[in-house]
Structure formats: C-alpha cells, structure tokens
Amino acid sequence: MEPTGSRHRTPSKAASQLRKGVLEYCVLALMRDGPRYGVELLRELEETGALATSQGTVYPLLSRLRRDELVVTSWRESTSGPPRRYYELTEAGHAALAEFTGTWPGFRDAVDRLLTPTACAQPSGKAEE
Amino acid sequence: MKAENAGDTERALVEQYLAAVGREASALPPERRQELVSDLAEHIEIALAERPGGTREILSELGDPRTIAATALQESGVGAGSGAAAAPEGRAVAPVTVEPVSGSGRRRTPAWVVVALPVVAMLAGILVGVLGLVLRIVGVVVLCRSRHWDWNQKWVGVAVTAFLPTVIALGYNFGVSSSDVPAFLPWLLTGAMLVMVAVGSGWLWKVRKA
C-alpha cells in the first residue's frame, strides 16, 4: 500500500520534446493490428518505453485523435468487470500512420548521421579539449 | 467491516484525484474537461477491475493531475499546440472525411447538418415563419455543441446565420409600417438575408475542423 511515485522519473527536456511529436504515431501504431482499450493501450505504451511521461497524459491525446477522426471508439463487454471502450483506427488514421511510417526512417537516419561521431565528421584536431 | 472501510478510502482517493484533475483543467471548455475526467474515471474503473486494491498504484501511474491538465490544454489549443497546427497538412493525404461510425464515442451532429440548418431554416421561414424560427434555434444549439468549430467561429456563425437575420426580420416586421415601403423591399431583404445566411454557412463549412 505504499505510494509508488518513484516509478516515474521526470523526463528530460529532450525526451519530452521528442515525445510530443512522436507519441501520437506510437499510439496509432499500437492500434494498427486491431482495436485496443485504453488501459491495455497505455500498458503496452509504457512497456515500449516510448511514453516517457505519466499515463494520464495520453487521454487528452486520444481525445484529440477522436476529434480528428483518426480513431473511433466502441464499447465492448468484458468477461471481467465493466465494459471496455475500444479505440480503432479509421481510414484516415491508417493513412496518417502510413505517412508517418514512410517519413520516419529517413528522418531517423538523418538525425543518426548528425549524432554519430564518424571519421569524416571529426577531423584530426579533435583532441584539443 | 475493515475491508469496507478500505474500499471507502480507495473510493475517496479516486474522487479526490478526479476532482483535482477537474480543478486543474478549469481553463478547458466544460465539455472537454468533462470528457477528460470521464476518460480518467473510466480508466481507473477498468484498471481496478483488473488489479483490485491497486488504487494508489493506478493513480500514481496516471500521474500528476496538473501535468494531465496541462497536456489537455495544449491538445485543445487552437493552432497553438504543435500537434493541432500540423494536423491539417498531415491529413491532406487521407481520403475525404470519414463519417464517425454510428454508436461509437459520443454522438454529435455531423458538420454538414449544422451548416445546412440555417439555410433550411431561412427557406422554411419564408413559407412558415414559426417553423423557420424553431429550425433556427435548433441550428444555434447544434452549432454551439459541435466539435467542428472553436468558440470564436461559433460566435461569428451564430451572429451571421441566426442572430442578424432574426434582427433584420424583427426590425422589418415591427419597425416599418407597410404603407410607405416599396413593394420590392421585403423581397430584397429576404434575398439579402438568404445570401448572408448562405455565405455564413459556406464560411462555417470552409473553416470546420474534421
């Protein structure tokens, strides 16, 4: 019964900036293979390590995805406990995810090239610190 | 008896938490705030069904109410949040609007109905005045409830498609004695109002959010 607040480190500024742009597509990607309910979605997101913040902040995002009609929701009965609200990609959601999936590798590689120290990026006089 | 007390404490914790979210999110439009709180309440209920007795852990995973409210404010910021601003271009590739599947989420009137109503109200009003008035009121209500426009757009929409036509009609009916008016004036006014309503509706259609 102890509070378990220590589970969430405060994310660094870089992590939270990154998260802002990418989280939406991570959430869409989790729904690619079929409908998911909120608790399940957040658990998986947390397990991937892409969340970098508390679970509750995903609900405003889900709400916007719903408003933008990238996802739709429907209630389903469960064998245990209350009915779950399932989130499902719409055609527009699939299209947005596909577009991001196409853009991401090039972007990632470009950033990698900038970040990775290579022989030509660091010429001979580098030991001057 | 003890177990019951523990249950009460856990329920109180949840209520406190949700109240805190509601308080922190007070800058959100009421509809958004309610949605946020009920989404979280739903999450807690289901998480508890899967993990009985885990209230504290579940709330701690959800995180600080202030952070959640701040995120919600960013997400609903019109044009301010990066996501909201970037969305229209991102969605340009998507095939035309997808109608919300019936029975999913909360029911809302589709944008085309909201936009068509003022025009229908105007035309109906020419035939049966009362019908026009009723439709116009319905139009204002569905416009205000719609998610397709922000509040500034809603105010303009209400003014142009409902308020001004009503004022003009009332002004004409009560302000002018019919004797000293040329015969074409009522038709001219009706035509002008129709154009105004049509332009207002067209504008609403153009600026609507998907």
Image: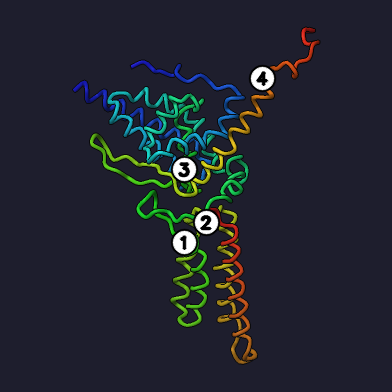
Name the residue tied to disc 3.
Answer: A63
Q: Which residue position is annotated with label 2?
A: B96
Disc 4 designates what residue? A116
Relative to A107, does residue B170 appear above or below in the rendering? Answer: below
Q: Report the disc number at residue B141.
A: 1
Coordinates of residue B129 in the picture (x, y in percent): 47, 79
Give the foreground label among 4 and 2.
Answer: 4
Q: Subunit of mark 2?
A: B
How many angstroms separate mark 4 from mark 2 (CA)? 41 Å
Picture layout, residue B152 above or below residue A13: below
- Say which label, 2 or 1, has the lower sequence index: 2
Q: Quadrant of the N terminus of chain B?
A: top left
Q: Are marks 4 and 2 on the same chain?
A: no
Answer few, some or many: residues within 10 Å of disc 3's Cα (few below 14, many 20 plus, some between 14 and 19): some
The kind of residue tagged 4 is Thr
Q: CA distance from mark 2 to mark 3?
A: 21 Å
User: Which three-letter amino acid code belongs to the residue tagged 2?
Assistant: Val
Amino acid on which disc 3 is placed:
Ser
The picture quadrant where one finds residue A119 is: top right
Mark 1 neighbour class, 10 Å CA radius: few under 14, some 14 to 19, many 20 or more? few
Q: Is residue B108 left or right of residue B201?
A: left
Based on the displayed image, in which of its 4 quarters is residue B152 positioned? Answer: bottom right
Q: Confirm or deny contact between disc 1 and disc 4 (CB under 8 A).
A: no
